[in-house]
Image: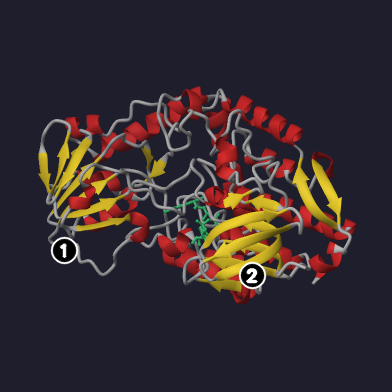
Amino acid sequence: MPDVTIAIIGTGFSGIGMAARLRRAGITDVVLLERAADLGGTWRDNSYPGAACDVPSHLYCFSFAPNPGWTRSFSPQPEIWEYLRRVAADEGVTGKIRFGADVTAARWDPDADVWCVETTAGTLTARFLVTATGPLSDPLIPGIPGLDTFAGAVFHSATWDHHYDLTGRNVAVIGTGASAIQFVPRIQPLVSRLTVFQRTPPWILPRQDREISRFEHWLFRRAPVTQRIARAGIYLGRETYSLGFVKNPGIMRKAEALALRHLHRQVSDPDLRARLTPSYLMGCKRILISSDYYPALTEPNVSVVTDGITEIREKSVVTSDGTVHAVDTLIFGTGFHVSDFPMAQRIFRPDGISLAQRWSAKPAQTAFRGTTTAGFPNLFVLTGPNTGLGHTSQVFMIEAQIRYAVSALRHARRHGIERIEVRPEPQAAYDREVQRKMRPTVWMTGGCKSWYLDADGRNVSLWPDFTWVYAWQTRRFDPSNYDLARSPRGVSDALAR
Ligand SMILES: Cc1cc2nc3c(=O)[nH]c(=O)nc-3n(C[C@H](O)[C@H](O)[C@H](O)COP(=O)(O)OP(=O)(O)OC[C@H]3O[C@@H](n4cnc5c(N)ncnc54)[C@H](O)[C@@H]3O)c2cc1C
């Protein structure tokens, strides 16, 4: 018998949601392996000044754990982190977490039909493995020549150094993505000089954030259905964005007009405005929302540099035009490892091929329903290939995947099945269909190079349709697409433990 029936790696929305749903399904022989000392994933790590969600909170949370107490329409990071801790405690998940357990390798043992999971806190065997390690959990710092010679403080937005006082510093911010546009307005008033190095300007829409009123709090608590209606309204509103992203990218021109009006209203200097105006179709890269980023860039202590960085020296950043920018602090807002799938590099089938190698082989077939891969039995990958989003709540997709995986495990319990493995043909057909739908999307036709694409220009990150289509496809486990092996020992008992 394995040490545990189900091992889940990670304790962000995915890991906590998976464990909670398993428990509700009566499957409790579960362990969660977390490399950090606390739970929360994204919302534990991204504590930089101004960190907040950019999908309204009533949608950016679990459907089974609504929070009538959100204080703002886009809640700040501490509140989301606190929400996750509360859900984990309420759902009986916290006690199942093994902290400080960085999973270094997981190998499938075909003789025993178990995963051997090696962690920095010891090794264990599990019948089923669920990776819940997130699409954005390994910070990416680009390999700029000379970076190791820099004498000042260096950190990434996801590993913010809260002990380091930025007051009076001469700071370089590298990158102008979703995190940078949140922390730049917060640090600009503190620092002496702020040089923002921008490779590609983002499209930015106004942030319609507001406090949630006492009346709304009262209403949501007294009549929970009203919160569900609010959530449904936000969901439907956000789904209409898909029309522009995946159905008819030309629609994005209308949204561009809104963003350009926002830019013109907030930036009067035509030269700065030109540098901040994107040249690709809106949506091709993540659309950002902010009402205080542009004003921060117009302050006298800020400059926006658009020449590429060629080198970093002991006390400066050098750009392609030969300018030497003196700085004493480097903050990277350069995003995360995404299309190289860090966790998939640590999961191995018996012949030593890793899941990442399998996914990058040609023809790449990524994962069936973004979740299961031939050759890797009893493995469910949450936020797997082509399950990411550019416009609405990732938690919606996570919950759909969880529903699918739990349905598979319930099927195994009901039928005494020990090994579940997707067949290569449905996996290949699924991938062809995803990539067919991907072709006309704004991410492929919008004229930009984004982190959504892998080295071959394939978009293996995003879901190219309405999210309800994905939820429909994953509503229940579909055994006809799988090879299933019955247990001589009765795994149904194990799943019921
Ligand atoms: C700053 C920021 C803002 C965001 N805002 C939004 C938003 O507004 N709306 C939205 O839809 N999405 C947003 N996202 C995307 C966000 O990542 C997802 O919405 C969601 O939080 C992902 O949850 P997760 O549990 O899958 O992954 P994560 O929250 O990343 O959790 C993964 C966990 O796995 C652990 N882990 C990783 N590798 C290992 C290992 N080898 N061994 C053990 N443990 C490991 C990590 O420590 C972490 O705790 C944002 C992301 C960032 C970075």
Coordinates of residue 14 in the picture (x, y in percent): 59, 57
* Mark 2 or 1, closer to the camera: 1
For this rendering, which residue is in front, 284 or 75? 284
Q: Is 261 on the left or on the right of 168, as rendered?
A: right
Coordinates of residue 341 in the picture (x, y in percent): 51, 45
For this rendering, which residue is in front, 342 or 317? 342
Which of the marked residues, 2 or 1, is nearer the chain's N terminus? Answer: 1
Mark 1 nearby-residue class (10 Å; few <14, some 14–19, many ≥20): some
The residue drawn where x is 66% and y is 27% is: 432
Q: Is 307 on the left or on the right of 341, as rendered?
A: left
Q: Amino acid at mark 1?
A: Thr
Coordinates of residue 229 in the picture (x, y in percent): 64, 54
From where the camera sits, is residue 61 visible? no
- Residue under numbered circle 1: 167
Q: How many marks?
A: 2
Q: Secondary structure at mark 2?
A: helix
Residue 222's label in the rendered image is: 2
Q: How is the image coloured?
A: secondary structure
Q: In this rendering, is residue 231 above or below 30? A: above
Quadrant of residue 497 in the image? bottom right
For this rendering, which residue is in front, 25 or 152? 152
Residue 241's label in the rendered image is: none
